[in-house]
Image: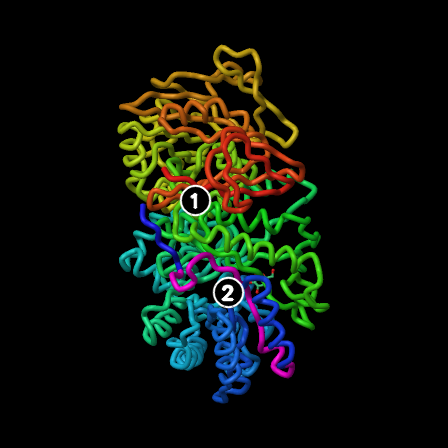
Amino acid sequence: MKKQPLFPVLNGLLHGGDYNPDQWLDRPDILAQDIEYMKKAGINCVSLGIFSWSSYEPREGEYHFEWLKNVMDTLYANGIYTILATPSGAKPAWLDRKYPDCLRVDNMGIRYHHGDRHNYCMSSENFRGKLKNINSMLAQRFAHHPGLLMWHISNEMGGDCFCPLCQQKFVEYLRNKFDNDIEKLNKAWWTTFWSHKYSCFEEIEPPFANGSIDIMGLMLEWRRFTTWNMIDCMKSEIEVVKAANPDIPVTANLMNMYNGLDYRALAKEIDVVSWDSYPRFHNDWESFDDTMRELAYSHAVFRCLKKDKPFMLMECTPSLTNWQAYNKLKRPGVMRLQAVQAVATGSDTVQYFQIRKSRGSFEQYHGAVIDHAGIDNRVFREVSEVGDILKKIDSVAGTKVNAKAALLFDWDNRWAIQDMQAMCVADKKYEKTLVDFWREFNRCGAEVDVISSLDDFSDYKIIIAPMLYILHPGVAQRLTEFVKNGGQLLATYLTGYTDENLLCHLGGFPGDNLSDLFGIYSEEMDTLFPSDRNGIKFRGFENKIEVFDCCEILKVKDAEVIGRYTDDFYKDTPAITVKCFGDGSAYYVAARTKASDLAPIFEQMIKNAGIMPNVMPPMIDYHERVADGEVYRFYLNLSDKENCVADVKGYDLISEKEICGTLTLSGYGTAVVKNIK
Ligand code: GLA
Ligand code: ZN
C-alpha cells in the first residue's frame, strides 16, 4: 500500500474550517487579527465563500470579487490555503424574486418562499443558468490562484422538490429506466394492487404526501430519482470549475447518515469525500463510549465511499452547536479525542465550523475557533492543542485503513425498509442495528469497512449483512461465491425479501437461492410489542440471551442449529444457525438481540477468518493506518480517567516517547504509536 496524501502541498494533515470574511468587510482590523489567530492555532487552510452569492452578486449582473481576492492573497501570503465553495448553498433574494421557479415546491405542492438555504430546485434552468454564470466567474478568477486547494461544491446538498419541472423530469427518468414501456413499470411496481395501473407515463406523479405514498416501487424510485437529479445538478457545477482548471480536486460536504440521497452514487462524481460531524457527546441516552464508537462507524461509512484515499472531516464544532435540542459544551479534552479519532479512522483533515463566530443571525451562538470575546479561552487553547498534535502526526497523511471485515449498507435498502409496511412500521431500527453490529465487531478486535452489496467483496474475509432486505441482481450469487471461497458471512432476519423493485422473492426467504447458502428458510416473522421478550439459548450453555422487537421462525434444511428460542409457541425452534459451505461459513441470526450478546459468534468468525484481533481493554478505541511498510497504531482513551494498554511497542508521536510495555493514557488521552512492519 502506497501513501497517497490528499494535499501534497500541505506536507501533512489539514487543519482548518469555514471562514466568512464577507461578514466583516467593514472591519479590516478583525480580518487582519484573525489571520494571526489562525496561525497561532496551527490552521493551514480555510473554506471560503460557502454562502457568498449575495456578496459576489448583490444585484443581478453586478459583481464583486475583489474582497475574495484580497482575502485569498493575504491568507496565502501567511501560509494558509483556501478551499473555495461554489455559492449554491443559499440563493440571493433577487434571484428568487425574479425567477420564482428557482424556489422549491414541497410534498404538498406548496412553493417555498425565499429564505433559509439548501433549497434550490435542481431542475430549474433559470437556476442552473444563473449558477453557471456565477461559478464561471469565480472559476475564471480563482481556479489558478496559488492558494486554491480544492473546490467545495455547494453545501450539504439535500431535500427534494415536487415542482412541475421536477415532476416532468421524474417522468422522463422513469420512461428511460423502464424502456418507455408502461407495462414494464406496472409490473415492477405491482400496480394492479388497489387499481394503481398507469396507462401512460404522464399519469405518474411524485409521492405527494396526500398522493401515491402507497406504491413501494414509486417511493423508492422517487428517492433514486432525487439522487440522480441532485447529482446531475452537482455535475453541472463541477463541469464549470474543472473546465477552468482540471487539476483542482472537488469535494461535497456530506451529512452524517443523511437519508435523502444515495451518497454512494454521489461520491462517484467527486474527487474526495468529506463530511460534517456533530455527534451528541455526553447525552442522556447512551454512554460516551457508545457515542464515540458510533462516530467511528460514521467515519467508516464515509471513508469507504472512496476506499482508495483518505477522507476529510470537513466540519465539526470546536465546542457546541446551536441547533440541536440541547447544545451541550464539549467537555475538556473531547475535541482532541474527536480530532485524533477522525485521523485514526482515515481522515487527513480536521476542520471546524466555524473559524470566527458571526456577530448576528442564526448561528451567532454556534461554537467557533475565535469567539466574540477573542481567543483567551478554553476552546481556542484546545483547538491550538489539536493544531500541535496534527503537526506531530503529520506523517500519517496519505496512509490507509486496511480492514478485512465489511458491513453491508445500501441506501436503497434503508429506504425500502423504512417504507415497508410490516414489522414495527414506525421504526425498524435498520441504522441502529448496523451501528450495533459494527461497534461490537470492532470491540471484538476487527476493523470493519462499510460497503455496498454491489461493491467488490474480494478484499474481505468477513461480511456482516444485517437486514439485507433488498437483494440486487447478482448479490446472492456473489455472497455464495464469497462463502464458498472461505468467507465468513453473517446475515439476520429480514434478509433477501425483495428484488430491486421491491417485489417479493418467491420460493422462500432469503430469496434468490440464498436460503440454500444458509440452509434455512424463514417461514414467518413475529413482531414483538415493546415490552415483550423472548430469549435464545446457545447450544451447550445454560445462560440465555434476550430477544426483542422481532423473531423469524425458521425451517432448517441443512444448517447446524446453534441457538434456540426459549419462549412462546416457537420455543425450542432454531434462532441462530450456521452452515459450512465450501471453505467458509454462513451464519443466520433470526431474531434481534443486543449485538454484544452475539460476541462469541463474532469471535468465532474472526478466528475462522484468520484475522489477528486487536482486543483492547474496556474504553479503549483502537485503529490502525498503514502504508509504505509503516504502521500507525492509534489508541484512544474513551474514559475521562487514566487508562492503560499492555504490550505496546513503538514510538508515540504525541508524547514523543518510546513505548515498550504498558501505554498509559490520561483521561480522553490519545497515542499514535509508529513502528515498522
Ligand atoms: C452545517 C452547515 C454549516 C453550519 C453547521 C452548524 O454543517 O454546513 O453551514 O450551519 O451545520 O453546525
Ligand atoms: Zn423542482
| Whether the residue under disc 1 has CB within 8 Å of ligand 1 | no
Spot occupied by residue 146 in the image (x, y as percentages of width and height): 40, 74
Instruction: Out of 527 and 544, give the one closest to the viewer.
Output: 544
Residue 439 at least partly seen: yes
Residue drawn at x 58%, y 75% is 21
Q: Which residue is mark 1?
A: 413
Q: Nearer the viewer, residue 60 or 356?
A: 356
**What are the residue bounds of the magenta stretch?**
7-27
Q: Give residue 188's position: percent from left, percent from top.
A: 34, 48
At 70% from the left edge and 69% from the top edge, which residue is drawn? 372
- Image height of 74 relative to 554, above or below: below
**Which structural element holds mark 2?**
loop
Indicate left or right for 239 with 313 as reference. left
Quarter residue 231 falls in: bottom left
Between marks 2 and 1, how big is the CA–CA gap?
Answer: 40 Å
Circle 2 Cα neighbour tier, 10 Å, few/some/many (<14 / 14–19 / ≥20): many
Residue labelled with disc 2: 44
Say whether residue 431 is magenta.
Answer: no
Question: Above or below — where is 102 with respect to 670?
Answer: below
Specify whether residue 170 is in view. no
